[in-house]
Amino acid sequence: MRKALYLAIGLIITFEGFACSAHYNNLLDLEKQFPDINIDYNSSHRGWSKYLSKSLHGTRKLALTFDDGPHPTNTPRLLNILKRYNVKATFFTMGALVKEYPAIAKRIVSEGHILAGHDWVHTNSNGESESVYSSGLKRTVLEIKDHNPNNEFYYRFPYGAYGNGRGGYHHLNAMKKVSQDLFGENCINFAFWDIDTSDWVSNMTSDNIVQTLMANLNGGVAYKFKKISNGYTKESYTIRRPLAGGVVLMHDIHKRTVDATEKFLEKIKGSNIEIVPLNEVREFEFGNAVCELLRVI
């Protein structure tokens, strides 16, 4: 009787452990940054703080991402620097610029970096109708996939703007439709960021950018953008609880950013700070997704 009771308890514990494990794996799947196929998104589904790359926090691991290129001179120079330090990055490129500078796009891919999409042109997605947004997204996917043989397709909204499209649609619903049309499955993995370097502010210097990166790792004085009457300026602030890891937002169209990248990589050489590719970050893994284009439209 006692043996039977112990056996029953053991089976219950084993089943509950299996169930918890399965539930945990499901939660991990839900944390991946694809639009959820089970959600009909509405205006309440906004913001990006919930899409932080929490698996990197506290690890002293950074994923470097660069927006708005390719730039005809700055991007090749940045690629030279990344190659010298054996670092892989992700380039969120404009579809129209990839079409204009295909040799740079091919080089990004051939040197082991990730070629990703940042829409066709740099407009605020919230100001576009669903048909305009979807058309631009499709064109971007097709242009990027023409150079990128891998199954992954990453996308970043210009300005991080999404969720309130003109006419009342939600961009994540539109994204799911575009992905189903092009791939037959959920394949467009949208990416925000954890660490904003504010490198686009005109009076930011390369040293300011490096200091901001280090402060996000160790704490200390950093720089962010501040709106003023005639535009934006930099403003210093103190980070007391650094994330100590995450996805970094920068822009390869600025010379100061390229300079800062070189200074930063030299500064962390031999340290315990690691640069990791975006597709190795848990939130951005594609797993067993096939993600092959069904047809060209």
Image (cartoon, rainbow, N blue to C red):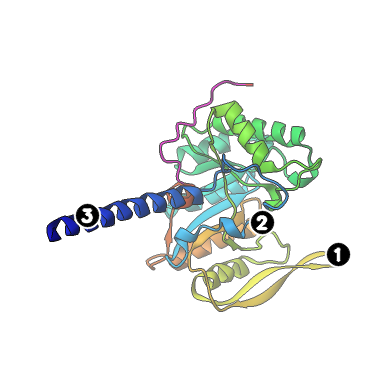
Whether residue 124 is visible here, answered yes or no, is no
User: Which of the two residues, 161 or 205, is positioned nearer the viewer here?
Assistant: 161
Task: Kindly report which numbered mark, 2 or 1, lies closer to the viewer in this rendering.
Answer: 2
Relative side of 179 to 59, left or right: right
Q: Secondary structure at mark 3?
A: helix
Vertical side of 82 occupied by 170: above or below: above
- Report x, y in % for residue 169: 74, 41
Indicate the position of residue 227 as horizontal and vertical percent values: 79, 67
Identify the residue position indicated by label 3 in the image: 8
Q: Is residue 59 above or below residue 110?
A: below
Task: Identify the residue shown where x is 37% and y is 66%.
Answer: 270
Which amino acid type corresponds to the residue marked 1 in the rendered image? Asn
Number of other residues with Cα within 10 Å of mark 1, as a class: few under 14, some 14 to 19, many 20 or more: few
Residue bearing mark 1: 230
Does residue 25 appear left or right of residue 152 in this picture? left
Q: Quadrant of residue 220?
A: bottom right
Q: From mark 1 to mark 3, how far is it between C-alphas?
A: 73 Å
Mark 2 highlights which residue? 47
Prevailing SS of the magenta stretch: loop
In the rendered view, tell whether residue 292 sits above or below residue 256: above
Q: Nearer the viewer, residue 100 or 189?
A: 189
Residue at 51 percent of width and 57 percent of height? 53
